[in-house]
Image (cartoon, helix red, strand yellow):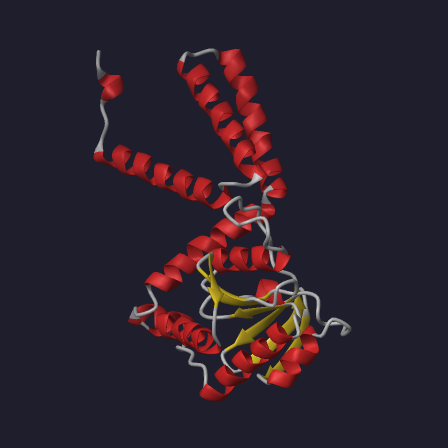
Amino acid sequence: MFDFINISVIDIIDIILVGLLIYQMMRIIRGTSVFNIVTGILLFYLVWVVVKALNMKLLSSILGQILGVGVIALIVIFQPEIRRFLLHIGSKYLSSSRNNLFTRLLLGRNDKEIQATALDEITQACRRMADTRTGALIVLQHNSSLEFVTETGDRIDAAVNRRLIENIFYKNTPLHDGAMVIDADRIIAARCTLPIVDNPDIPPQYGMRHRAAVSITKDTDADAIVVSEETGNISFVSGGEMKTITSMSELKLSIENSYRKENV
């Protein structure tokens, strides 16, 4: 009589895994317009489960067909969000397994270090751009692949140089609009388009550069440097958290720490 409440260990694990999956998905899309849509879909699915449990065959069949076709539609509609979710999971895995010997051998990953010369070139370029109020967005690549970002811009593949950085972000040059991607001591690409997700936690005074920096550092393990065109302030963004830089030594330390955490 009570067979319907028999729950095995596998059932408990299944429920926990589904709960974690839903939690991670809702956490990523929280604060966006997609959140309300996904909430509605989950409620719709819950209604279908209840209808099916009550053995209402006709209604259950109709709702089941809608959900079946809707899965394909959701993949198309939410393609950017699905990509963002997979990037988030992949980045978390690489971050947690960076000291795993098997992972290093399998992926051929080498720890990166930034040379003192490149570090000085970046900080001096940021100082000059802050003085002249030249807007800039620099993304520091670590373990996560940013190919999906660099393919939207123009390939540079040049050594880090302060004059080159300043010239790229000078407002009258064709490459100034967008983000620059730096991988250790090389400028990989410029004029790159970053994914931007609505986030109510970002103060309204921050512009698109800051929002893009928060988005890319939440999706991947990359860090970002933003120079405000309006105020000349420099911000360092890591893990979606934004910190205002008050001195060049603080900026240099932040960049150094971003590469040190990679090798911890």
Q: Position of residue 74 (x, y in %)?
A: 59, 37
Give the residue at the far bottom of this rendering.
117
Up the image or down, 258 lies above or below 39; here it is below
Q: Nearer the viewer, residue 5 or 135?
A: 135
Residue, x 31% and y 69% (percent of image)? 102
Res 8 → quadrant: top left
**For this view, does 77 lie left or right of residue 102?**
right
Q: Position of residue 190 (x, y in %)?
A: 65, 72
Q: How many marks?
A: 0
Question: Is residue 35 at least partly visible in the picture?
Answer: yes
Q: Nearer the viewer, residue 32 or 209?
A: 209
Q: Position of residue 177 (x, y in %)?
A: 70, 66
Question: Is residue 222 at least partly visible in the picture?
Answer: no
User: Considering the image in quadrants, where does the N terminus appear?
Assistant: top left
Q: Nearer the viewer, residue 146 or 58?
A: 146
**For this view, does 65 lie left or right of residue 152?**
left
Q: Nearer the viewer, residue 95 or 199?
A: 199
Up the image or down, 235 lies above or below 185; here it is above
Up the image or down, 161 lies above or below 23; here it is below
**For this view, does 33 lie left or right of residue 27?**
right
Q: Position of residue 264 (x, y in %)?
A: 31, 72
Res 33 → quadrant: top right
